[in-house]
Image: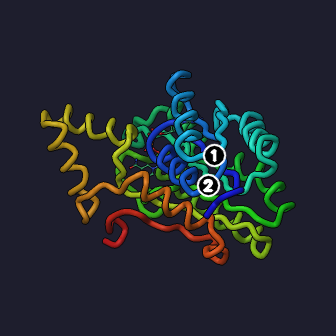
Amino acid sequence: MLKGKSAVVTGSTSGIGLGIATVLASKGANLVINGFGEAAAIEATRAELEAKHGVKVVYSGADISKPDEVKAMIDLCVSSFGSVDILVNNAGIQFTESVEDFPLERWNAIIAINLSGVFFGAQAALPHMKAKGFGRIINIGSVHGLIGSTHKVAYVAAKHGVVGMSKVIALETAGTGVTCNTICPGWVHTPLVQKQIEAIAAGEGISIEAASEKLLIEKQPSKQFATPEQMGELAAFLSSDAAAQITGVAIPVDGGWTAQ
Ligand code: NAD
């Protein structure tokens, strides 16, 4: 389905990004993977994706909060594969604290990575996509781009910003063959959420299993986690020709969280 296409997936050394990279590779896309981690583990992931799916995979260690590094990552995709057809802006971090006590350093980091990083990626990729007359920018937002929760002021602000930014990119690219959409996951069991589960378990003196159940019951009516693979399948669909007229939308994948 995506044979001959090339994709950059930010934050793909872990969690949702890795799930999306794996699905895009399984559909035939060549990849630039990105994110932090141990060099040996990243190289093992890169080599496994290539071997398992018969595609080419290169790694960029770009820090998404740095525009020059993001541009170099996009340029790496173009120099390796001749184009950047799909950009999945997925890298993101979380920090929870009340508004009054939220550390300025964490606010700045979340805005830089979760919001500005998406802008840097789109700005670097768009000229290549427009020149080719094809492009898919897929931003990984969150249910927190649509509604709020306590103790997530920077994250909710950044994710609402991503939903808004996607609409502007969609309008500026309408009719050019480029689309821009936001996927809005509810709870997905990844290291980012595991930290929140562990905090609930420690704070309330309950087991990890009980904390995990509590987290789901509080917000997600299905009481089931969504999976990185489900995000990958949706990203693959949005990358397909069938989705050529889907642009500027935010699609929740949240077990009913935002239906309430
Ligand atoms: P994760 O912690 O498993 O993965 C985050 C990835 O981003 C890692 O590869 C990490 O190395 C990378 N990263 C972090 N800072 C970076 C930087 N400055 N430059 C480059 N890479 C960086 O988290 P996840 O749960 O897979 O989250 C991925 C995305 O999905 C995030 O944008 C997150 O906000 C969003 N999301 C997650 C959930 C969930 O329930 N897990 C729900 C909604 C939205």
- Left or right: 174 as drawn, with respect to 41: right
Q: Is residue 56 above or below residue 224?
A: above
Residue 220 position, x and y percent, is 28, 61
In front of the other: 220 or 129: 129
Identify the mark nearer the N-term, 1 or 2.
Answer: 2
User: CB under 8 Å between callouts 1 and 2?
Assistant: yes
Q: Position of residue 99 (x, y in %)?
A: 42, 43
Q: Secondary structure at mark 1?
A: loop
- Ligand 1 under 8 Å from disc 1 Cβ: no
| Residue at 19% across, 43% down | 211
Quarter that holds the C terminus: bottom left
**Numbered disc 2: secondary structure:** loop
Which x, y percent locates residue 204?
15, 37
Q: Looking at the rendering, in which quadrant would you find the N terminus? A: bottom right
Q: Amino acid at mark 1?
A: Val
Q: Which residue is mark 2?
A: 28
**In the visual, does 253 lie left or right of 164?**
left
- Give percent across and percent down for residue 38: 51, 22
**Direction right: furthest residue:** 131
Write down the residue under mark 1. 55
